[in-house]
Image (cartoon, rainbow, N blue to C red):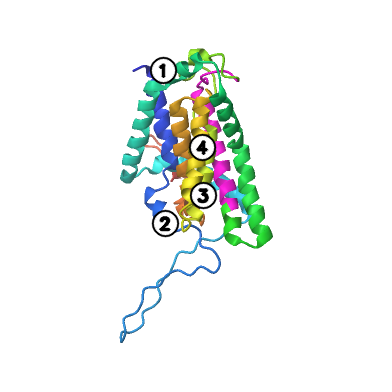
Amino acid sequence: MSHHLLRLLLICGVALLPALACPARVGANPVQQPGEQASVPSQAEGTTPSRPAETTKQPRPTLKEVPWRIVRDQRFLWLRPFRMKRSDLPWVGLIVGTTAGLMAIDRRVGQGLSDSPPGSGYTFSHNVSRVGAPWSDLGIAGAIYLVGRSRGDQRAQTTGLLGLQAVADSVVVVEILKISTQRPRPTFSGGLIRDHNADGEFFAGGTSFPSGHAAAAFALATVVSEQNREKRWVAPVAYGFASLVSVSRVTMRMHFPSDVFVGAALGYLIGQHVVHGAGGATQDRPLRSRLLPAISAAGGTGLTLSWEF
């Protein structure tokens, strides 16, 4: 295994770990909407009524709060590796292991697709990719918010705002990773000419890893699905479309399989964090710094700066 691949696997582990916003929250309730009442355990007849259990009610986001929430999310996500828990290890191992397995076939897939001329499948993939672009996802989330606002539907408004937040978070994370990994795409625009021989190497100047389309599509799909969990048809439709967008990036010869998988994993985990961390409970402890005087054993004086996170 080349030193480039070892270096990349290390980056994958660090990059994906921030998005692991406690998998235990995956089954938590989404943001509570007006008119929704939390269930209270029934009292047995003849017993003394007990104090109703307190429920955790997530405050509803507002449009003006979205930029601040994005900044707060980024702070939390990029500091997450320093707060790794033992429960994170199975998730990290699964994601990094799957990524490594896909990297082993990236070159064969990229070169195999680029050997054949683009046909109707390429055209279909191109059209799906345009519909599922990150900017389109932002537009979809914005439309959900506006429709909800015009109809007085608080759930739709909240879904739209959380969707905007999740997609924006995914764009920021993906762009930073693209700059860090510098992986050329399998082919240049048009799908006819190989880029860097479609070899899947990293740190060779490119923007292939990870897939921004996959990350944004899964981030939005996760928010929509979690906010409408009582409607069983929503999740299959949302995740089905996100999967179609992700696969189209491979068949369009713009990404390798590992690019798409990592993007989809990031989008899903970021979406989970945004929905179940909407009230700020998942932001953990604030980053605190201390500046204290120090005296050395040799008699010198100075200052020490420390961070607690």
**Distance between mark 1 and mark 4 Cα atoms:** 23 Å
**Distance between mark 2 and mark 3 Cα atoms:** 13 Å
> Residue under circle 1?
108
Q: Position of residue 149 (x, y in %)?
A: 66, 58
Work out whether mark 2 precedes mark 3 in sequence or the reverse, and give the earlier one: 2
Q: Which-is-in-front pick, marks 1 and 4?
A: 1
Work out whether mark 2 precedes mark 4 in sequence or the reverse, and give the earlier one: 2
> Residue under circle 2?
28
Q: Give the magenta-colored segment's residue range.
A: 160-189
Q: Which mark is residue 7?
A: none
Q: Position of residue 64 (x, y in %)?
A: 65, 53
| Left-right relation of 214 to 96 | right
Please rate how many residues cluster around mark 1, counting C-alpha atoms within 10 Å: few if below 14, some from 14 to 19, many from 20: some
Predominant SS along the magenta part: helix
| Left-right relation of 155 to 64 | left
> Residue under circle 3?
223
Q: Position of residue 1 (x, y in %)?
A: 33, 18
Q: Is residue 162 magenta?
A: yes
